[in-house]
Image: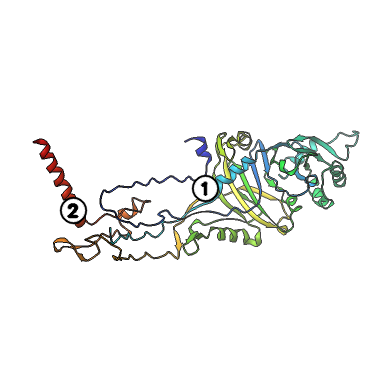
Amino acid sequence: MSRMNRWALGTGLGALALASTVVLTTPHRARACGGCFGPTGTATVVTAHRMAMSMSPTQSTLWDQFAYSGDASEFVWVLPSSPEARVEVADNRFFEQLESSTNVQLQGTFPPLRTFCPDPCGGFGASPSDGAARDAGAAPPGAPPPPPVMVHHEGTVGPYETATVSSDDPMALLGWLQERGYAVPDAMLPTIRYYGEMGLAFVALRLSPGEGIQRMQPVRVTVPGLMYTLPLRMVAAGVADKVGLRLFVIADSRYEAQNFPNATIDANSVYYDWATSSFNYDALFTDALNSNSGRTWVTTYVQSAPPLGGRYWGEDGMFDIDDDLSVALEGLSTPTLTRMEASLGVDALDRDLILSASPDDTYISNFISVFNERNRPPEPECSFDTSRCGGPFPPTPGTVGPGGSTSTMPMTRPDSPRSRGGSTLCSATAGSDASSTAPLLAVALAALAFAMRRRSR
């Protein structure tokens, strides 16, 4: 199996070849079932803040994709992290590949098999070792006091200017950022104080002067060691009412929320409604999101993560995401990809998301075969209107054919192999009645035999 196919963790739809048989006989019309494939659908993709986290004992990385519409000079992104954080620009197609490979695909049952009717005429939180690391790095007695703001790193990454800073004085840190063009509002002071008291530094990002928001790219922040906390308190700073969150977790096993309720969608509860031509998956998904006062994280996908490297088709042709994949899989022996989603109100953003290995190691596919259905339409009745027939022997059911024999057109029932065409092909070509085609065939054979005798003489 190619790497491209293994990366496509969703499902592919095979092509169906329809073979037709040409019959040299009198013209006739045929009706067959219309649409022999079962209905298909895709779960509605709700606009959400997309993030990805890769967690291993050696390093952890957070990817964040920005959605911003405003003055470029007012854009700012702040993440509490360790001072050793490495900030890099990520490829937006990394998110696109994660998204497309994990979107839920729904496959319904076959439609009603039409009775064959013949024609009548034919963050990152602090790790357990952070406290010891801070103690080990404490200044010796008699050393000069540290500056009010410690600058761990300043630089330019792609279209962004970035700085990693820390301080015991949240006011001094806020003032330092604002003086250098990072539009951090004063209202962020309590949040900065909260993470600062945990001993964390802050990674700040802003667009370089002259860069517009159309140049915005996702970023990835890598820190050493295992980090298992997503700083939702920072997300709350820019949320007025509610925010949709989509998180891809790449780790050695399936992960879930430790301090929030978790849920999954029961595939056996999904059905297709023929009256509305829709699946109820979206309704089940929304109910799960809104459960537990809207604090639930819903896991919709768990599978082995993609192999390292590969080239894939995109809107602009072939591309590769080797760089982001190599970072994502660093230090992982059995990488597993988990997709989690939530729709959290401001009141639910009062805590950071703590991730932990799930006790349930069951894989969840994004391809769901739906066998439950509602309002299935009945089989239609066939009509045998012979008023438009012009032939001498219209083969209508129950009429008397040549020689006094009763001729009835064959009916292919729904359980007939001919109507199904194996398992997917259920259309068929209506054949002529044997009593009407036999004389024509006999005349043709007799003429052929007479011609061959004349040539032999």
Q: Is residue 320 above or below residue 17?
A: above
Q: Residue at horizontal 79%, vertical 50%?
A: 191
In the rendered view, how is the structure colored?
rainbow
Choose mark 2 or mark 1, whichever is in front: 2
Name the secondary structure under disc 2. helix
From the viewer's perspective, tell me whether residue 115 is left or right of residue 446.
right
- Image coords of residue 31 (percent x, y): 34, 57
Q: Identify the image quadrant of the C terminus.
A: top left
**Which comes before the other along the chain, label 2 or label 1?**
1
Front residue of 371 and 397 = 397
Name the residue tied to disc 2. 438
Residue 44 shows in this picture:
yes
Name the secondary structure under disc 1. loop
Name the residue tied to disc 1. 363
- The numbered dot on residue 351 is none
- Image coords of residue 172 (percent x, y): 88, 44
Q: How far is the residue under mark 2 from the one under mark 1?
A: 60 Å
- Image coords of residue 309 (percent x, y): 57, 33
